[in-house]
Image: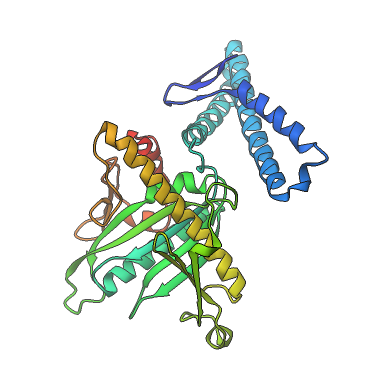
Amino acid sequence: MIVSTHAGTYSKHSWCVFDLPKIKTELHEIQNKSEDPDLWNDRENAQRVMKSLADLREEVEIWDRLQQNIQDALELAEFEDPALQADLEKIIDEIESELSRRELSVMLAGPYDKGNAILTINSGAGGVDSQDWAMMLERMYLRWAERHAFEVEILDRNEGDEAGIKTVTMSVNGRYAYGYLRAEKGVHRLVRLSPFDAAHRRHTSFAQVQVLPEIDDDNTIVINPEDLRIDVYRSSGAGGQNVQKNSTAIRLLHIPTGIIVTCQNERSQMQNRENALRVLRSRLYEIAEEERQKELAGLRGEYQKTEWGSQIRSYVLHPYQMVKDHRTEYEVGNAQGVLEGDLDGLIEAFLKSPVSRV
């Protein structure tokens, strides 16, 4: 249920307030900026302005349409005509569905929640079983992205020794990609009968998922070229003779932090370099954000970094099927459905929980 007033739109199920008049004022201001004839003298700033304009227009249109549906429902209800009951119920269903989507989008209010995400999966200890589990997670996120019409770009992929993958880094591009996927950050645990064990015994495998916002090439994170050591080498992955004969893969070392980023999926050395810088910017942002969180946590309690010990979710395929998120206690019986990309229930439970705002 929502109540619309001149002050804004409220959801009784939500902890947020969407101030529609304020957003419309902001839209008007950005519209004026977009009409400035000198705007495109700074191309990067102009692109940010136009993106903000498109995002705000979409938000305002959705909320205006929602309020109109509510008004239509109230008018139909006043007639108290049984013949109009089906139309009234259809409008109410549309309102409830849209409100559920809007409630989630209002919760995604972080500075980078609306943007793209860089997702990395690392296999844990356990050899081929863990590497196979990492590839299962890769497939799960690709299927989830496909369901939401997000574009996925594989930036780097390291094949496993016998099967699966050791690590993969991908860019997930679309509105709110990072806001949704930040729910996936942490260690994921799989329990199953191992297909690689001749005795077919039950094995437990681990993989770590890292999710970072993609940081635009602005003043948020500044990388000094003198702080970089760049090595080029031949790609070890698939890609044909061109990849094997030419040194197109890139390894970046950020000397002050010791961060190493590799990218080898593109045939162009320049494109691999640009992709490596994208990942490096996001990792430097993560370091800065962790330092900020440590300072805040010093006042309110304990700080816990996401490491191998901080398991967030278990996927059990034997002796029964269940997926359980240990942060929210949300459970799903259809484990195969989750592995096919049906993650929305788990993600929504996280976003609606207090732990997502810590």
Instruction: State the residue in front, 269 or 70.
Output: 269
- Residue 301 visible from this viewpoint: yes
Above-or-below relation of 142 to 116 = below
Which quadrant holds residue 246? bottom right
Q: Outermost residue, front direction?
A: 226
Position of residue 20 measured from the top left corner of the image (x, y, whole percent)? 60, 23
Above-or-below relation of 71 to 260 = above
Q: Quadrant of the C terminus?
A: top left
Q: Outermost residue, right direction?
A: 37
Colour setting: rainbow
Q: Residue at x 41, y 73 (%)?
A: 158
74 sits to left or right of 35: left
Above-or-below relation of 196 to 334 = below
Position of residue 187 measured from the top left corner of the image (x, y, whole percent)? 30, 55
Instruction: State the residue in front, 331 or 128.
Output: 128
172 sits to left or right of 183: right
Instruction: State the residue in front, 246 or 145.
Output: 246
Q: Residue at x 80, y 36 (%)?
A: 35
Position of residue 289 measured from the top left corner of the image (x, y, whole percent)? 41, 45
- Residue 346 visible from this viewpoint: no
* Callout count: 0
Which quadrant holds residue 303? top left
Position of residue 156 measured from the top left corner of the image (x, y, whole percent)? 48, 69
